[in-house]
Amino acid sequence: MNYISTRGDTTPRGFCDILLEGLAPDGGLYLPERYPKVDAATLGRWRSLPYAELAFEILSLYIADIPPADLRRLGEATYTEAVFGTPQITPLTRLDEGLYLQGLSNGPTLAFKDMAMQLLGNLFEYELARRGEQLNILGATSGDTGSAAEYAMRGKQGVRVFMLSPHGRMSPFQQAQMFSLQDANIHNIAVEGVFDDCQDIVKAVSNDLDFKRRYSIGTVNSINWARLLAQVVYYFAGYFQATRSDHEVVSFAVPSGNFGNICAGHVARMMGLPIRRLVLATNENDVLDEFFRTGTYRVRATAETHETSSPSMDISKASNFERFVFDLLGRNAARTAELFGPALARDGGFTLAAAEFAPAASYGFVSGRSSHADRLATIRDTWQRHGVMIDTHTADGLKVALAHRAPGETMIVLETALPAKFAATIIEATGVAPKPPAALEGIENLPRRYTVMAPEVDTVKRFVAMHCA
Ligand SMILES: *Cc1c(COP(=O)(O)O)cnc(C)c1O
């Protein structure tokens, strides 16, 4: 399988060629040149497989440049009960007849990003060893992504992580999670500033191409194809748990920000998984809901981006969205480049022609938005009626799922974080404090390892250089 860019670069590249890269050289995103189709016989064969085996089968369809025995071993090392808490890895919880939560947040950082990031850590280590190379991951985080990356890369050969976070601004739990890591290859840099300062520093360092090359600087952001591919697996796993035969059709509801999670659902559907609808849920930052209702994609300014109680969905633009639009336009790379190229920054968005937007429904997408009040009501209701505590992001998904659900429609709502991560809102909704998993109790009292730094590009560069020697 080769990979192409959404903006037209068709240089043949294998999976491992794009594994360690971000954007394609033409500024587009990588996609497989076609989606492998899965027939009924294959679905039948996959239905009873353990998660790691299922992951191997799906990854194999997209990865031709890692020997199968190695790929199988990487999958088995990643998706274990020890790391994800249950033998199912992504277990379903039944709320009502035909209504389920799929638990994607039982990994080390209690959010669904672990599902992909844990595999990425093993893939990076494998590929870097094979090439005899090293990689220094530089990133900025306001919480979830940074900790998922650190827990995936800790102790890995050939990889170092330098993670910038705004000093004193992450939640106490998030700080404890990241700063208690004692691994020599993990470096936490607490920047005296806000998240945007951290991100500006990362951009400035990455734009210094000399420095970038000299110190092998890389990233692990959400546009990475390997992350998306890893997420395709749990749509299959959820489907098999919710159904008894491969004639049944299900829908998924997905709390969305950068369109990474739901884009994996789109890929699963394109492969032939019987998905009726993909229900996209946003919070008050409703860029994507607006698009699926109107065909207009309007990037929000910083001042227009709300800080909400489902903060991992507080986005101004959706970095994976270009992948879907490319497919929606019949894979017209020239038109995709026109929409997402310099014009997007200049005009702040685009409106698709009616004929371009019309097929969106045939891809199964519907959408809706949820507010803080909706979130509270959904968390409270789920707690009172089912005795199940859900986090704020999952609540957005469930709220929009219920608004769209047709009678008899099997609906799987993806649970993207555990409530313990967002305790304040859970207490506001239910009056009850969510319990963190036993393994994380007392994490606030562990010794911490981090470096406080002024928001200066050169200071960060010096620190990176010093620790790369
Ligand atoms: C990242 C994240 C999301 C949004 O996922 P996207 O792939 O960006 O759409 C939703 N919920 C939680 C808890 C997250 O961490």
Image (cartoon, helix red, strand yellow):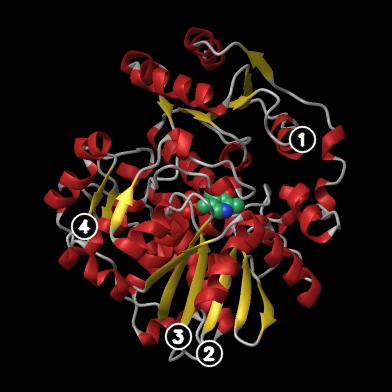
* Ligand 1 within 8 Å of the CB at mark 3: no
Q: Residue 30: where, in percent of width, then height?
A: 28, 48
What distance separates the C-alpha of mark 2 from that of mark 3? 13 Å
- In this view, the mark in front (2 or 1): 2
Categorize mark 1 by other alpha carbons within 10 Å: few (<14), some (14-19), many (20+). few
The tag earlier along the polypeptide, 2 or 3, is 3
The tag earlier along the polypeptide, 1 or 3, is 1
Q: Secondary structure at mark 4?
A: loop
Where is mark 1, residue-wise? 172
The amino acid pointed to by label 3 is: Val
The image quarter in which residue 1 lies: bottom left
In this view, the residue in front, 268 or 195, is 195
Q: Secondary structure at mark 3?
A: loop
The tag earlier along the polypeptide, 1 or 4, is 1
Where is mark 4, residue-wise? 352
What distance separates the C-alpha of mark 2 from that of mark 1? 42 Å
Where is mark 2, residue-wise? 407
What distance separates the C-alpha of mark 1 from that of mark 3? 42 Å
The tag earlier along the polypeptide, 2 or 1, is 1
Mark 2 touches mark 1? (CB < 8 Å): no
The amino acid pointed to by label 2 is: Pro
- In this view, the mark in front (4 or 3): 4
Q: Residue 140: where, in percent of width, then height?
A: 53, 30
Q: Residue at x 33, y 72 (%)?
A: 271
Describe residue 415's horizontal placement relative to residue 436 as left or right.
left
